[in-house]
Image: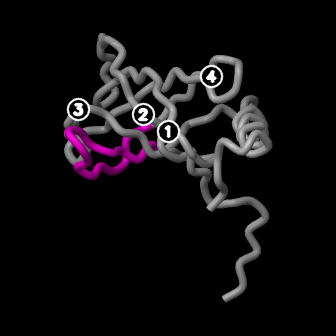
Amino acid sequence: MINRRQTPFRYVFKEPIAFELRLLSIDGVQTPSKPVKAILHNISKSGCCVWLPLLLPIEERQIEVSLGLVLNEEPLTLVGELRWSLPDDEGNRYGIKLNIPEEDHDILPRELRELAGHGRIIAV
């Protein structure tokens, strides 16, 4: 099979990035929430993997979250839906499918190119 992919599947951070995650809704119902300390391990144009000190019922619920982070210099807010989880070091790793509006589709790739240029991420 020939791989015709022009861009890498995902980018892994050499040093994971700490950020704040907020639960936006559970099953479509808005939830008041405090920020939760989280760690970003890898990211692609369509999703990411984060560590949280929480156990969330993603198999039974549809959970929408907001990620407030700084990849380079400018604050960035990404919204997505939790898709999978794995237990990991006093918490869980979660896969998040990002829901990026059409008008913002160029922002994340630009940020990732800058990170790669500074040697802070590895393309895999």
Amino acid identity at mark 2: Ile
* Image mark for residue 76: 4
- The quadrant of the image that shows the N terminus is bottom right
Q: Of discs 1 and 4, which sits in the foreground? A: 1
Note whether 8 is above or below 63 in the view shown: below
**Residues under numbered marks 1 and 2 in contact, where contact means CB atoms less than 8 Å apart:** yes
Q: Residues within 10 Å of mark 1 (few under 14, many from 20)?
A: some
Amino acid identity at mark 4: Leu
105 is within the stretch colored magenta: no
Note whether 84 is above or below 57 in the view shown: below
**Residues under numbered marks 3 and 2 in contact, where contact means CB atoms less than 8 Å apart:** no
Q: Of discs 3 and 1, which sits in the foreground? A: 1
- Find numbered disc 4 in the image and state the secondary structure of the residue it sits on: strand
The residues tagged by marks 4 and 3 sit, at their Cα atoms, a distance apart of: 23 Å
Reading the image, the residue beneath label 3 is 54
Which residue corresponds to the image point at 70% horizontal and 36% vertical from the top-left? Answer: 108
Reading the image, the residue beneath label 2 is 39
- Find numbered disc 3 in the image and state the secondary structure of the residue it sits on: loop
The residues tagged by marks 3 and 1 sit, at their Cα atoms, a distance apart of: 18 Å
Which residue corresponds to the image point at 33% horizontal and 45% vertical from the top-left? Answer: 93
- Find numbered disc 1 in the image and state the secondary structure of the residue it sits on: strand
The residue range painted magenta reads 81-96
- Find numbered disc 2 in the image and state the secondary structure of the residue it sits on: strand
Q: Quadrant of residue 99?
A: top right
Note whether 107 is above or below 94 in the view shown: above
Q: Of discs 2 and 4, which sits in the foreground? A: 2
